[in-house]
Image (spheres, grey):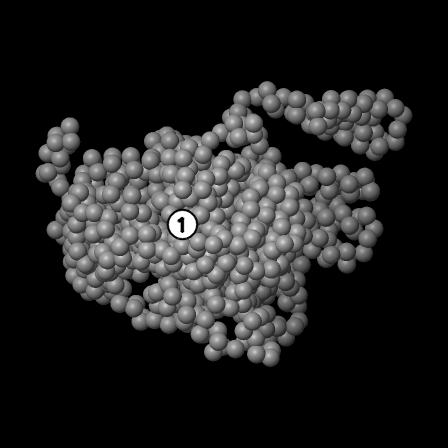
């Protein structure tokens, strides 16, 4: 069957070539002399650390930005896209890392935004749109309706709308920039089936992700970029994870987890939560000791973030008790929580964390501004020092600390958030990390783990939330599994396995209440 | 909560019965009957709703959750309350007054509203209209018939729109600031041209534009406004051009990435806004029999109030012409009603602010309940 298909495709086999592409931004050489090609029917992974140039390459492909040198060749023909529109017309669809949706409009309008099926009087044929959108929704096995407002959908469903938008154009080339970050396992499965379908139809698929598992599951070729240069290319079937990491980081970082120096002496109880209850979480009780790393596992939307927010005073609590540092506390807002020594590094860097229009320096000093005062004024030298520390510690790729956060790549933005909440001026007793490694590269991940361990050794309590199971299993001293706002189980580091955690994460709540 | 349905039905029946049989004053009797019918209908709907199919329920919810629907209900309540206070409120003359005062706000709100949906704004609308009223007065004094005069002044609207579009799309100024600047310039220009004197118009046939009664009951300006609302409502909701206005306002970058020409689109809208402002100024000049620097004062602020009350988000991307139309009636009715109720006209000014706050409160509570329901799922 597959043989048959590839034979059919041979006559019109598609070929995408990047030829000597270079691009420089003020202060950063984003790409230099990158050349490689992808054939139809192959899924090609673009890998590299944050700021290696993957997103820039995709933006050049989509016509969003233009290369300084070099060009894209499509089936042997040179292309010079001056706008995204031309790229779409040439048969290229890019699914951006930052969702490009119109939140106030319906699903069908978002999917068909550049082709509203107008009749000859310019009227939109809504019934046609509705029907076509419904077909897509069925193919994607999604539960929403063509006329639902996109802003009302969950983040995972929004991401699927974004994917549908590119998928329905039936483009020859589809590029995914970290598509799975907001998705749950169910949607990831659907997505992978779609990618396989695209492959069978002879399309060219480009795939950017930091999740190793996905790369080995879905891709055929791997292109590794580092500092804007092409390091090497692999056939996925002929390489190993270790080899890949080595190529990306430029050195052998060995086994990320076994090198960690764990904290071996736990202190007294730092935080006790008893029967915490609000709209999203129910009967949450647990203890956290000083120097302990408590992992919160569960599916996206299970209520992990909501538990963190409730403790942090960001969401109201209906009933229940929080005893922190020996006293019962009632935080009315995050301000109170921060004053007591709790830091929350939030999951959604755009909406909850970062001031995109502000410099790295400003972004890092926000929670500790009062400690940087010299008389009535901010001590800018100290503030700059703090920012420089963070840039160094997490190797944030930037020409200076005065660069605006919005101008950095996604992974580097995440690092700024981490730098903010772990700066040396923070007097932290409890550190809550919500998906701290989302979208950041292997090298920096290892650095984050080291810092977590260091904090633990200093006797700071840590709540660690992550959707990457291997990470939770390897970092945490103890794991609490959440499902549908309830705690469905607790596992120690020794007894926890992926299977056990997954089983608990999908356990029906009724069973637990017994 | 289960008890609420039978109680509503019984109350409704009782109300109708009391209104019909008891020997009450006419207004009280009508009140009883009206309330009875409302309660009865509400009860019946609540009874039937769970029995209907999922699809119908969804549709029902969609209609009742619409802002236009809530505004419309509110309009009816406002009508009722003022009528209950003073029956003269529903007199022919008074209704005519409401229609006339709805006109300027409503028509300007169409032009500004379209721009707001696209994420822009035109603060020069009021003073553009003011200049238009002066221009038409001056042109008519030369003895030119009013139709070509009107067309000439509309060209002035096109030019104004082009200037605004140039500042926003080519110079990349924020429309809030650049149209404010244009507005100020026009304001001063109007005073210089007229030396703060009113310019009287002598062309009798031109006055018809401002005061002709269609079928003897509907003022022509009001009819013009309604026709415009219908046309723009259809364009916005049903044509590709209209939907692209929402797209640009909702996420300009996403629209750009999909190949939508946002600059062209907003240029058209600025020109459209200029034309509508001029048309408003012309009709007002026809009604006042003069061109004047004072009549259109801060008309754009009233129009923005109407647009926001009608459901157009200041941030762009949402809102409907039906809502704006109802909102213009609502504000006109409220202002008129306060006078009929015997309050000083100064309260009218306060009422606009209060209505606006009420609209924001409504948005706020709906957003809250929506987020709550999202969290539960």
Q: Residue at x 34, y 71 (%)?
A: A399
Taking B147 as reference, is A401 above or below it? Answer: below
Q: What chain does mark 1 sit on? A: A
Question: Looking at the figure, which quarter contains the N terminus of chain A?
Answer: top left
| Closer-to-camera residue (B203/B219) | B219
Q: Give the x, y percent position of residue A245.
A: 25, 54
| Closer-to-camera residue (B222/B245) | B245
Q: Residue at x 58, y 38 (%)?
A: A282
For residue A426, say whether it is visible. Answer: yes
Q: Residue at x 17, y 56 (%)?
A: A232
Most extreme residue toward the top, as rendered?
Answer: B51
Which residue has dot 1 on it? A475
Quadrant location of residue A66? bottom left
Q: Give the x, y percent position of residue A319.
A: 65, 42
Quadrant location of residue A42? top left
| Closer-to-camera residue (A8/A1) | A1
Q: Give the x, y percent position of residue B193.
A: 58, 73
Q: Is residue A325 left or right of residue A179?
A: right
Q: Residues within 10 Å of mark 1 (few under 14, many from 20)?
A: many
At mark 1, the secondary structure is helix
């Amino acid at each position: 069957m597959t043989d048959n298909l590839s034979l059919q495709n041979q006559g019109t086999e598609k070929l995408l070539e990047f030829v000597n592409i270079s691009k420089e931004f003020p202060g950063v050489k984003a790409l230099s002399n990158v050349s490689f090609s992808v054939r139809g029917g192959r899924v090609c992974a673009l890998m590299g650390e944050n700021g290696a140039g993957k997103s820039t390459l995709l933006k050049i492909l989509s016509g969003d930005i233009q290369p300084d040198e070099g060009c894209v060749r499509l089936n042997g023909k040179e292309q010079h896209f001056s706008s995204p529109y031309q790229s779409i017309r040439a048969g290229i669809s890019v699914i951006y890392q930052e969702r490009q949706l119109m939140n106030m409009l319906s699903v069908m309008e978002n999917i068909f935004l550049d082709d509203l099926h107008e009749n000859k009087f310019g009227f939109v044929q809504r019934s046609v749109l509705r029907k076509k959108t419904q077909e897509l929704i069925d193919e994607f096995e999604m539960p929403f309706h063509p006329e639902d407002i996109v802003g009302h959908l969950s983040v995972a469903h929004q991401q699927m709308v974004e994917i549908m938008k590119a998928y329905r154009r039936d483009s020859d080339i589809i590029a995914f920039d970290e598509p799975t970050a907001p998705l749950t396992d169910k949607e990831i499965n659907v997505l992978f089936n779609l990618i396989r379908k695209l492959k069978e139809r002879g399309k060219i698929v480009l795939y950017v992700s930091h999740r190793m598992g996905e790369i080995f599951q879905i891709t055929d070729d791997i292109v590794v970029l580092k500092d804007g240069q092409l390091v090497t290319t692999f056939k996925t079937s002929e390489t190993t994870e270790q080899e890949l990491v080595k190529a990306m980081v430029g050195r052998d970082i060995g086994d990320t987890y076994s090198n960690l120096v764990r904290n071996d002496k736990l202190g007294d109880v730092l935080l006790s939560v008893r029967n915490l209850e609000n709209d999203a979480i129910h009967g949450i009780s647990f203890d956290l000791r000083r120097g302990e790393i408590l992992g919160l596992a569960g599916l996206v939307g299970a209520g992990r973030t909501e538990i963190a927010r409730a403790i942090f005073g960001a969401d109201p609590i209906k009933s229940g008790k929080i005893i922190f540092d020996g006293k019962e506390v009632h935080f009315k807002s995050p301000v109170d929580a921060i004053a007591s020594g709790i830091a929350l590094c939030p999951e959604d860097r755009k909406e909850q964390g970062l001031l995109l229009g502000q410099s790295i320096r400003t972004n890092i000093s926000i929670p500790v501004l009062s400690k940087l005062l010299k008389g009535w004024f901010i001590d800018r030298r100290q503030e700059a020092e703090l920012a420089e520390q963070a840039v160094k510690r997490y190797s944030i790729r930037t020409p200076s600390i005065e660069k605006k956060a919005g101008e950095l790549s996604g992974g580097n933005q995440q690092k700024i958030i981490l730098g903010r909440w772990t700066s040396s001026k923070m007097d932290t007793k409890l550190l809550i990390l919500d998906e701290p490694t989302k979208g950041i590269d292997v090298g920096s991940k290892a650095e984050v783990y080291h810092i977590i361990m260091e904090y633990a050794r200093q006797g700071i309590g840590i709540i660690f939330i992550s959707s990457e199971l291997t990470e939770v299993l390897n970092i945490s001293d103890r794991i609490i599994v959440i499902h549908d706002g309830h705690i469905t189980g607790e596992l120690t580091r020794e007894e926890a396995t992926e299977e056990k955690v997954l089983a608990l994460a999908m356990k029906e709540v009724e069973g637990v209440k017994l | 909560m289960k008890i609420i349905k039978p109680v509503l039905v019984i109350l409704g029946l009782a109300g109708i019965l009391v209104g019909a049989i008891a020997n009450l004053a006419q207004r009280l009797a009508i009140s009883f009957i009206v309330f009875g019918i409302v309660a009865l209908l509400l009860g019946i709907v609540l009874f039937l709703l769970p029995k209907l199919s999922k699809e119908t329920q969804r549709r029902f919810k969609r209609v009742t959750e619409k802002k236009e629907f809530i505004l419309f209900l509110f309009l009816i309540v406002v009508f009722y309350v003022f009528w209950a206070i003073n029956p003269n409120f529903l007199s022919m003359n008074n209704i005519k007054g409401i229609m006339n005062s709805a006109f300027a706000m409503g028509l300007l709100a169409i032009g500004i509203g379209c721009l707001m949906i696209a994420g822009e704004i035109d603060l020069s609308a009021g003073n553009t209209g003011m200049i238009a009223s002066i221009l038409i007065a001056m042109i008519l004094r030369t003895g030119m018939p009013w139709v070509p005069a009107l067309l000439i002044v509309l060209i002035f609207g096109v030019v104004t729109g082009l200037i605004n579009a140039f500042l926003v799309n080519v110079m990349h100024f924020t429309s809030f600031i650049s149209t404010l600047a244009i507005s100020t310039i026009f304001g001063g220009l109007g005073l210089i041209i007229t030396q703060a004197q009113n310019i009287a118009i002598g062309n009798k046939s031109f006055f018809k534009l401002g005061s002709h009664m269609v079928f003897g009951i509907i003022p022509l300006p009001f009819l013009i406004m309604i026709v415009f609302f219908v046309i723009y409502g259809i364009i916005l909701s049903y044509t590709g051009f209209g939907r692209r206005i929402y797209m640009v306002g909702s996420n300009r970058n996403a629209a750009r990435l999909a190949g939508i020409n946002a600059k062209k689109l907003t240029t058209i809208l600025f020109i459209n806004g200029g034309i509508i402002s001029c048309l408003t100024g012309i009709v007002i000049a026809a009604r006042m029999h003069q061109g004047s620097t004072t009549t259109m004062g801060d008309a754009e602020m009233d129009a923005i109030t109407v647009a926001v009350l009608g459901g157009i988000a200041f941030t762009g991307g949402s809102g409907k012409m039906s809502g704006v139309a109802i909102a213009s009636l609502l504000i006109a009715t409220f202002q008129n009603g306060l006078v009929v109720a015997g309050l000083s006209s100064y309260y009218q000014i306060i009422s606009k602010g209060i209505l606006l706050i009420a609209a924001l409160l409504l948005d706020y509570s709906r957003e809250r309940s929506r987020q709550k329901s999202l969290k539960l799922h």
